[in-house]
Amino acid sequence: MKKIFMLIVLLTAYSNIFAFLTQANWRWRNDDGSETTATWKEAQNTPFTQSTTGEIFRLRLEVYNNLTTSENMLDTLQYATSITGPWTNIDTLEGSNAFMISTSSAFVVQDEPTTAQLTGVALPFSAGKIMVDSAILRINLPTQQRTECEWVIKGTTNIAPNTTYFFRQWGAAANNLDIGMTYPSLTTAVVLPIKLNGFTVSRENNKVRVQWATASEQNNDRFDIQRSSDGSSWATIASVKGKGTSAVSNTYSIYDERPLSGNNYYVIKQFDLDGHFSLSEVKFTKMPKAKSIISVYPNPSRTAINFSIVNSGASNVEAVLTNVNGSIVHHEIFKTVPANANIKLNLLKKPAPGVYVLKLNADGLSESVKVVIE
């Protein structure tokens, strides 16, 4: 309560300053990439439909200073179910609010400077900030310049279905909106399929345990657990049957028996009985780099290049041989590679003498090794 009171005092003290600044363009995006690479949910100034609770997403907002002096911004993000309010501050604690500052992201960090990502007003750009684990934004906006701030937020278990929510920064009252602009908004689905009480990933020796719970379920068919090495390309590693419609809490867990060496990102994709789906937030863990499981011989080589996967078999193995410049010299896919089997690359011709890199990719396998051709 003390924290909220101090926030109100600070924002009230600065509201006369921010009242001269103008909120303009906005855009919703997914929390699936960096400040420059995260994908967009919809076109600029276009609402989106939120289909699940617990999903982390981001709101990019443009503010500009059309005054003759620079202005200090002390601001917070608010939401309401009507453009006339009442408006609620979005805090780092869930409480009874429908939205909260996410407090974490696998892709961006608190106070990370922003670059121009929106088609904005015709003013020079000044870097803003990304807000991940703080409800209070502090920046200085020079005269006759614009900035973009990005808020990383998520819907809580208190979010209401079939409801339109509007968003604004503290000083963005109606007369502070640029001409023709509207408040950022989103509409929740008629039915929010699942309410996640928790979603965690944890290392247990050489495995990863993925666990989640639902507060309730409605028409829930199944959960697909997906994994990625970069947070961009996803593959389903397990599928778990849901409880259909249930008013009680249910807990689920699976083990990723063959996690990737290094970064492992996980997301839960929940499917309704009618085929509609929704995504959870992204969770991350890092496995220690394992010793290479690829054996290449002879190395150096005068003729053929052979490889084997030590103590492990794999299917649909993609073998890519590149030179030191990254150009592909040979590409081949092996349907089945038994453990410790001697596999020969079907080279059309011997590569020129030099150093090359052989990379093998398959489900649960991503390994590279240097190869010397004499």
Image (spheres, helix red, strand yellow):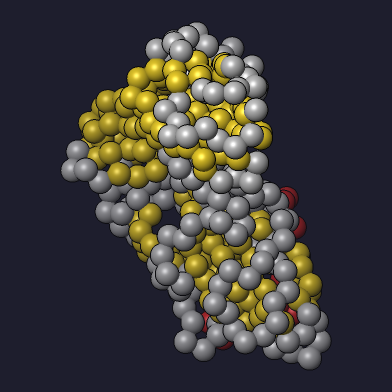
Residue at 27% across, 25% down: 241
In front of the other: 211 or 297: 297
Q: Position of residue 21 (x, y in %)?
A: 67, 81
Q: Position of residue 59 (x, y in %)?
A: 54, 62
Quadrant for residue 116, please give it. bottom right
Q: Judge left or right: residue 256 versus residue 218.
A: right
Residue at 36% across, 38% down: 269
Q: In the rendered image, which quarter contains the C terminus?
A: top right
- Residue 21 versus residue 113 in the image, above or below: below
In front of the other: 306 or 196: 306
In front of the other: 334 or 162: 334
Q: Judge left or right: residue 268 versus residue 217.
A: right
Residue at 65% across, 41% down: 324
- Can the viewer see residue 55 in this picture? yes
Q: Looking at this rendering, what residue extends furthest in the right direction?
A: 69
Q: Judge left or right: residue 205 versus residue 218.
A: right
Q: Position of residue 196 (x, y in %)?
A: 42, 35
Residue at 56% across, 39% down: 322
